[in-house]
Amino acid sequence: MTPRILLVTEERELRDWMRHHLDILWPEATVTDMPVTRFSAALVELNLLDFDLIVLSANCGEEDADPGDGLDLLRAAMAVRGCPPMIVIAQGGNELSAAEAMRAGAADYLPRSLINAQRMANALRIGLRAPRRGRIAERRRMRRPQRLDLDPDTLDLPQYSLLHKLGESSRAAVYLAYSATLGRNVALKISKPSIDPGEECQEFAREYAAISALRNPAIVDIYDYGFHDGREFIAMEYFPCGDLKMRLQQPMTTIESLQYAHRICAALEVVHAAGLVHRDLKPPNVMLREDGSIVLIDFGLAKHLDKAHLNTMIGVLRGSPYYMSPEQAQGLPLDGRSDIYSCGVILYEMLSGHRPFLGSTAVEVMQQHVIGERPALPPECASLEPLLHRMMARDRDERFGSASEVCAALNGAQDLITVQPGHPDSSVTLQ
């Protein structure tokens, strides 16, 4: 493979770094670099057919800037017929800038602060496989909102073969799909057609941004993200062993419950260390691997800690009411202790076999979290009441202060548990 790549950047350090890695990936590649100002001035005169891929450095402004800031040059280039695929390396910007760049036609979007060799290599491979684009107006006609009764199975996503539906919500459907590019099955989440043509697809953009910032075996891998025929999609790691909700259909021992809770909290340490709150922690979002390890998925509601109070007002609350912390149910600012509460609810369900709070409506369930009394654990788990209280305290100041503190407490509880002689594994007590 001998790709012809154009680097458009004013930053010498980034240019030299890119050239170094391109020499390693494709030693025979032809690499041309050009300052942003020169590229902008010469865009009309350039023969873009001379390049297979353009890597564009864009300054997207401060974090609270408009998502479209800094992307004018991308839009101008994509308006040129025959423009090759473009990868945006963004300085600044926010979690919606990625979605705006993809809408404008970018093959991929990489935050400058998160770039590394592996991520860059993946983006380059994706870009070199993408087709050349026509005019923006032509693509806009292709992205008109689909009819609401459109069967998602008829959606023709390049490089993906839909096998069967794994699940769906009001906003998206998840399919088991075969990726011709990767040569294996993936979980492919596809947005449903929007009722409002102007509605922002913030959730997919937020999920893409959140997962891209987290590189850990306990966090789902993301392989691809983009738009096709007006629909957003994300391709992620597929887990044939299913999720914790499925596992809860079978009895679980106390020691198993504590071990699962520990693994979840260890994953939350990674999430919180990145400055994020998951906000939708529940058994269906805890996937299982064959070795018993867990993986957190569905970061569509994840928020940065300094923004976790946004979009949580009553009437637009998102998340499962069964696992929602009291402060989330009230639309209050959130921090990592909200996820700890949700993990406590999951632990209660694993230990008791049922959820702590029920109701005929979502509002009733949320009220129970705010004013209700949590039912006691089964007698054989009574010694775990102090631990569970500190995870599920209504007043967050009475909860554990961090996921690492919970992990330590769960380790201590496991150390004290012994299986009583002559009893099945499900009969365990604390000494």
Image (cartoon, rainbow, N blue to C red):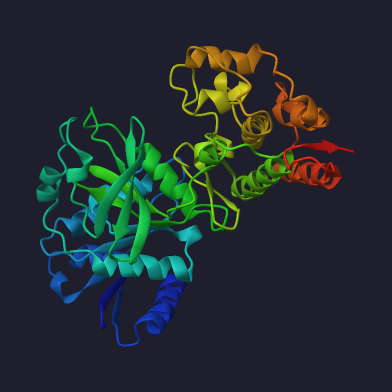
Question: Residue 200 or 320: which is nearer the viewer?
Answer: 320
Question: Residue 298 or 138: which is nearer the viewer?
Answer: 298
Q: Residue 271: x and y, percent?
A: 59, 47
Residue 15 picture quarter: bottom left
Q: Residue at x 48, y 42 (%)?
A: 299
Query: Where 245 sits versus 374, above or below?
Result: below
Locate the N terminus by quadrant: bottom left
Q: Residue 193: x and y, percent?
A: 23, 35
Report whether 303 appears left or right of 390. left
Report whether 273 appears left or right of 92. right
For the image, the number of numbered tags is: 0
Query: Where 67 sits versus 10, above or below?
Result: above
Q: Residue at x 49, y 67 (%)?
A: 116
Residue 207 picture quarter: top left
Q: Residue 281: x and y, percent?
A: 55, 36
Say whether residue 318 is visible.
yes
Q: Residue at x 28, y 51 (%)?
A: 163
Residue 304 picture quarter: top right
Q: What is the residue that sits farthest to the bottom in this orientation?
A: 28
Q: What is the residue that sits farthest to the front in this orientation?
A: 422
Question: Residue 149 or 338: which is nearer the viewer?
Answer: 149
Q: What is the residue that sits farthest to the right in this orientation?
A: 431
Q: Residue 213: x and y, percent?
A: 51, 53
Query: Where 410 sits versus 195, above or below?
Result: below
Locate the C terminus by quadrant: top right
Say whether residue 10 is visible.
no
